[in-house]
């Protein structure tokens, strides 16, 4: 009787194993997890995600989002400038400078890249070049951004100070482009 019950349970188990569970699609015979975007769902642009993460102070995550955006859109002036700005926030000044210079090389009229390059140069002690870069950003912006004007003013003040004074004359602001306007990314 026990053998017969065991056989019956084994038969039921086999039949249950043959039933579809909805776990795998018939379209994809791969036993691995799906990759890429989920059907019916749109992925949020990596630049938008990165900008939000920068505002939240999550610079490492923002850098990853910007890299994802670069993989999706290519190394555009927007992605290069964003990667450079995130690198600056992470203290990776050499990387930030390279990315921002590449952005400017792609579009010599891209104001946020000029401004943020000026911030990098101030951080590395290249005050004369930073002042020239801020002048370029200010001219291209036509004086529209208070942050760029303040950055230029601070760099000129620091340039005029004696070399004996090693103190900081103020905090510089990063800017980025978003929907036709320049948005400030301030330090906390």
Image: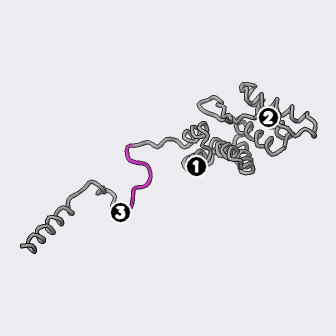
Q: Position of residue 93 (x, y in %)?
A: 74, 48
At horizontal 78% and vertical 39% (from top left) the residue drawn is 118
> Contact (CB < 8 A) between labels 1 and 3?
no
Report the Cα–Cα distance between label 1 and label 3. 28 Å
Q: Residues within 10 Å of mark 1 (few under 14, many from 20)?
A: some
Q: Residues within 10 Å of mark 3 (few under 14, many from 20)?
A: few
Q: Position of residue 173 (x, y in %)?
A: 72, 34
Is the C terminus in the top left, top right, bottom left or bottom right quadrant? top right
Q: Name which of mark 1 and mark 3 comes first in the sequence.
A: 3
Report the Cα–Cα distance between label 2 and label 3. 55 Å
Residue 65, placed above or below residue 147: below
Q: Is residue 39 magenta?
A: yes
At horizontal 75% and vertical 30% (from top left) the residue drawn is 148
Is the N terminus in the top left, top right, bottom left or bottom right quadrant? bottom left
Residue 66, placed above or below residue 27: above
Task: Give the camera-side residue of 79 and 50.
Answer: 50
Mark 3 sits on what residue? 31
> Contact (CB < 8 A) between labels 2 and 1?
no
Q: Is residue 88 magenta?
A: no
Q: Is residue 159 left or right of residue 110?
A: right
Q: Name which of mark 2 and mark 3 comes first in the sequence.
A: 3
Q: Residues within 10 Å of mark 2 (few under 14, many from 20)?
A: many
Report the Cα–Cα distance between label 2 and label 1. 28 Å
Numbered tag placed on residue 64 in the rendering: 1
Query: Residue 33: which quarter of the image?
Result: bottom left
At horizontal 87% and vertical 40% (from top left) the residue drawn is 166
Q: Main secondary structure of the magenta part?
A: loop
| SS for dot 1 | helix
Q: Position of residue 111 (x, y in %)?
A: 71, 34
Region rendered in magenta: 31-40
Numbered tag placed on residue 91 in the rendering: none
Query: Residue 137: which quarter of the image?
Result: top right
């Amino acid at each position: 009787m026990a053998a017969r019950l065991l056989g019956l349970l084994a038969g039921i188990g086999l039949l249950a194993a043959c039933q579809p569970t909805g776990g795998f699609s018939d379209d994809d015979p791969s036993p691995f997890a799906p990759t890429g975007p989920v059907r019916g769902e749109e992925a949020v642009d990596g630049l938008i995600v990165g900008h939000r993460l920068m505002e939240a102070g999550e610079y490492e995550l923002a850098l990853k989002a910007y890299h994802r955006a670069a993989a999706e859109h290519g190394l555009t002036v927007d992605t290069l400038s964003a990667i450079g700005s995130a690198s600056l926030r992470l203290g990776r000044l050499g990387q930030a400078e390279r990315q921002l210079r590449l952005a400017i090389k792609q579009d010599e009229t891209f104001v946020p890249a000029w401004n943020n390059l000026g911030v990098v140069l101030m951080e590395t002690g290249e005050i004369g070049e930073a002042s020239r870069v801020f002048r370029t950003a200010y001219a291209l912006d036509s004086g529209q951004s208070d942050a760029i004007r303040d950055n230029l003013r601070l760099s000129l003040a620091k340039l005029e100070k004696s070399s004996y004074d090693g103190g900081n004359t103020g905090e510089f602001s990063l800017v980025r482009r978003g929907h036709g306007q320049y948005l400030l990314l301030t330090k906390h």
